[in-house]
Image (cartoon, rainbow, N blue to C red):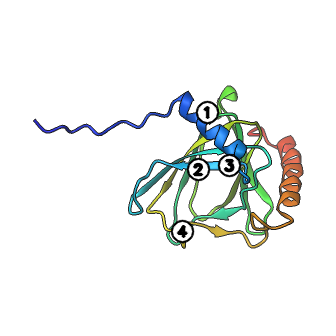
Amino acid sequence: MQNFFMSLIPITEKEIEKFVEAARLSERKRIIFNYHTYSEDTMQRMINAIEPGSYVQPHKHENPDKTEVFLILKGKLAVVIYDSLGEIEDCIMLDREKGNFGVEVPPCTWHSIIAFETGTVVYEVKHGPYDPVTDKVFAPWAPAENHPQANEYLLHTLKKLNRFAGKNSKI
């Protein structure tokens, strides 16, 4: 009889803690562990452990267009949506304790993520296949990750989020 079952890949507290520790030790203050195993995989699946202070340059997924989903496993993570000029258009704080478990970002949407708590971990799903050349289009109005002004931009965004939070119940 043929075995139709494949090996399960558990996501356990022990695994999550390994990712959290790796993110804490990382210069970027984040680490991604891919569950997709080959470049032709039509669905990218990954764990993203991210610490406060990690700067993820706003970007979008287009050509090919890709939907992206974030599910919170631990901590607090803001998913920020921007308009074409770089102004905050929408935001949600993923926080299991508040019942905000996940969010789907539509294709061609400028977005970024910001950790608000140490040890933050999300499960991320995005259409594939992965191609580093076409995966992301970075926002021209935001500094690159290694740019000297990246940290200043992140702090400025956090101040904007505080103002945005006063008008919005999702954060």
Give yes or no for contact between labels 3 and 4 (Cβ–Cβ under 8 Å): no
Cα distance in 3D space between marks 1 and 2:
13 Å
Q: Is residue 13 above or below residue 162?
A: above
Q: Secondary structure at mark 3?
A: strand
Q: Where does the image place residue 116, in percent across and percent down from the top left?
A: 77, 40
Q: Secondary structure at mark 1?
A: helix
Q: Earlier in the sequence, mark 2 or mark 4?
A: 2
Residue beneath label 2, please?
32
Residue beneath label 3, please?
30
Cα distance in 3D space between marks 3 and 2:
7 Å
> On residue 17, which mark appears?
1
> On residue 132, which mark appears?
4
Residue drawn at point x = 44 percent, y = 63 percent = 129
Residue drawn at point x = 52 percent, y = 72 percent = 63
Q: Identify the amino acid type marked 2.
A: Ile
Viewer-proximal residue, 139 or 49?
A: 49
Circle 3 crowding by C-alpha within 10 Å: few under 14, some 14–19, many from 20: many
Left or right for 105, reference 113 = left
Q: Earlier in the sequence, mark 1 or mark 2?
A: 1
Q: Secondary structure at mark 2?
A: strand
Q: Where does the image place residue 4, in percent across and percent down from the top left?
A: 21, 39
Residue drawn at point x = 89 percent, y = 59 percent = 152
Viewer-proximal residue, 31 or 101?
A: 31
Quarter holding the C terminus is top right
Q: Earlier in the sequence, mark 1 or mark 3?
A: 1
Residue drawn at point x = 87 percent, y = 45 percent = 162
Give yes or no for contact between labels 3 and 2 (Cβ–Cβ under 8 Å): yes
Q: Where does the image place residue 127, in percent across and percent down from the top left?
A: 47, 57
Q: Secondary structure at mark 4?
A: loop
